Amino acid sequence: QVQLVESGGGLVQAGGSLRLSCVVSGRTFSAYGMGWFRQAPGKEREFVAAVTWSGSSTYYLDSVKGRFTISRDNAKNTLYLQMNSLKPEDTAVYYCAAHKYPIVTMAAGDYNYWGQGTQVTVSS
């Protein structure tokens, strides 16, 4: 059984920073492609960032490029999302997701395992 547990969300003022973490258990973390997605009220879940199994390649939603950084520590079975220069439009529930193969895509439907989500609220 694969489990993903996110943490690090909260309330922050515009321009502030947060770091999200996602601890993965149940299988070999380094075998997974990993991604972060978010869902705002009344909107569909959208891709935010992804990282390959080795951490050597990363991919971002255009609107977060230069502000967010995805990374992973395979020794700690942990995925991170460093979010800087936060904007009110970044407000959403953020989810980490694991692909059962060592690949990444931008489609939520391609991911096999999901965390419960962590709320990020950015005030103006």
Image (cartoon, grey):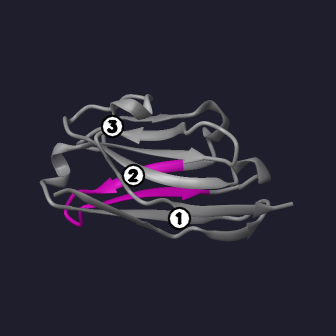
Asked which quadrant contains residue 116, the reply is bottom left
Q: Residue at x 63, y 62 (%)?
A: 120
Measured Cα–Cα span from mark 3 to mark 2 = 18 Å
Q: Quadrant of the C terminus?
A: bottom right
Say which of marks 3 and 1 sits in front. Answer: 3
Q: Which residue is mark 1?
A: 19
Instruction: Give the quarter of the image for residue 15.
Output: bottom right
Query: What mark, if any, has residue 71 been given in the picture?
Result: 2
**Residue 94 location (% of width, % of height):** 54, 54
Which span of residues is magenta-colored? 69-83
In the rendered image, residue 111, in percent from the top left (x then y), is placed at: 33, 37
Q: Which mark is residue 28?
A: none
Q: Secondary structure at mark 3?
A: loop
Count of numbered labels shown in the rendering:
3
What's under tag 2, amino acid-wise? Ser
Q: In x, y percent, where is residue 91?
A: 70, 54
Indicate whether residue 73 is drawn in magenta. Answer: yes
Q: Is residue 23 left or right of residue 67?
A: left
Q: Classify the position of the N terminus by image quarter.
A: bottom left
Disc assigned to residue 111? 3
In this image, 2 relative to 90: left or right?
left
* Residue at the image position 58 percent from the left and 55 percent from the top: 93
Tell me if mark 1 has few (under 14), some (14-19) or many (20+) residues whose alpha carbon lies within 10 angstroms of its own.
Answer: some
> What residue lies at 62% left-to-right and 42% top-to-bottom?
66
Residue 24 percent location from the top left of the image: 26, 61
- Sequence-first disc among 3 and 2: 2
Q: Residues within 10 Å of mark 3 (few under 14, many from 20)?
A: many
Q: Residue furthest right?
A: 124
